[in-house]
């Protein structure tokens, strides 16, 4: 059973997430004290090494996230940031510079959490030796997963088309529709409002925007399995999203099919 540590300033706000993770058969430890000790560099990594994931609560401010991520950098577990409504530019920067491995939302469903953690876990299991090198940098095409140069899939070791087909088969209905919307837009930017309208036939409510961020995250994570060189979906801050042009070329060439 994998263990998850939630670092927080208030354990009461973590109850819903803790319950969901326990339903997924994770052993969850929630602590304010460990957060304080890590911030003040008063704890050792020996205890932390029993955890496979560390989740940093939305109750912790961004400057403290940076300090925590640096303090946890020498450990082998995945660092996940939890946000309430949306991914801020600072948190996105933390992802792209390698301080975080993933971002999840308090609105994420059980299914969404399961898939996100499953991808993180499968990559860890397949690359244990390489992960121990700790030469990880942010996988910028994902809002939730690190890219490590040592973990990049070699085009000489995998059938590229099969890799893309495998990802497409494992996209959920919503994820597939999202990719389809962006592919149809070509090289144009699609606003968050327009995507929400297409996916849910409603405007950008807080719930829909949180779900959209989570969906973008999961799609980017899944395309990590392919030889795609850039990010599967680019975030254009203040404007919306755009599909990666290499992925667009592959789709338009007919190598893979989008529902």
Image (spheres, rainbow, N blue to C red):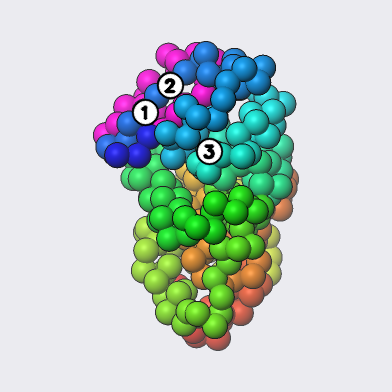
- Which residue occupies 71% across, 43% down? 93
From the viewer's perspective, is residue 28 above or below residue 200? Answer: above
Depth check: 182 or 148 in front? 148
Residue beneath label 3, please? Answer: 80
Say the numbered circle drawn on residue 28: 1
Image quadrant for the C terminus?
bottom left
Label 3 vs 1, first from the N-terminus: 1
Image quadrant for the N terminus?
top left
Q: What x and y, as percent, mark residue 152?
A: 58, 66
Q: In this rendering, does residue 63 appear at all?
A: yes
Figure disc tally:
3
Q: Secondary structure at mark 2?
A: strand
- Determine whether label 2 and label 3 are within 8 Å by CB: no
Residue beneath label 2, please? Answer: 30
Alpha carbon of mark 3 to alpha carbon of mark 1: how far? 14 Å
- Determine whether label 1 and label 2 are within 8 Å by CB: yes
From the viewer's perspective, is residue 194 above or below residue 252? Answer: above
Dominant SS in magenta? helix
Alpha carbon of mark 2 to alpha carbon of mark 3: how far? 14 Å
- Which residue occupies 55% across, 51% down? 132
């Amino acid at each position: 059973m994998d263990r998850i540590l939630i670092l927080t300033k208030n354990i009461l706000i973590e109850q819903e997430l803790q319950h969901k993770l326990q339903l997924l058969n994770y052993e969850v430890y929630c602590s304010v004290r460990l957060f304080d000790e890590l911030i003040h560099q008063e704890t050792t990594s020996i205890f932390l090494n029993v955890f496979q994931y560390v989740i940093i609560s939305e109750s912790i401010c961004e400057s403290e996230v940076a300090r925590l991520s640096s303090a946890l950098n020498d450990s082998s577990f995945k660092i996940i940031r939890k946000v309430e409504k949306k991914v801020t530019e600072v948190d996105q920067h933390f992802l792209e510079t390698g301080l975080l491995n993933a971002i999840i939302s308090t609105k994420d469903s059980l299914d969404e959490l399961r898939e996100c953690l499953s991808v993180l876990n499968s990559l860890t299991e397949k690359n244990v030796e390489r992960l121990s090198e700790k030469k990880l940098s942010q996988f910028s095409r994902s809002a939730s997963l690190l890219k490590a140069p040592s973990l990049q899939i070699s085009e000489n070791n995998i059938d590229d088309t099969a890799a893309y087909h495998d990802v497409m088969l494992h996209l959920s209905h919503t994820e597939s529709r999202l990719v389809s919307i962006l592919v149809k837009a070509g090289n144009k930017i699609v606003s968050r409002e327009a995507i929400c309208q297409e996916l849910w036939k409603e405007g950008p409510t807080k719930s829909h925007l949180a779900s959209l961020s989570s969906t973008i995250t999961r799609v980017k994570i899944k395309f990590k399995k392919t030889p795609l060189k850039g990010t599967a979906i680019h975030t254009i801050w203040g404007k919306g999203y755009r599909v990666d042009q290499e992925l667009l070329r592959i789709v338009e060439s007919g190598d893979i099919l989008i529902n």
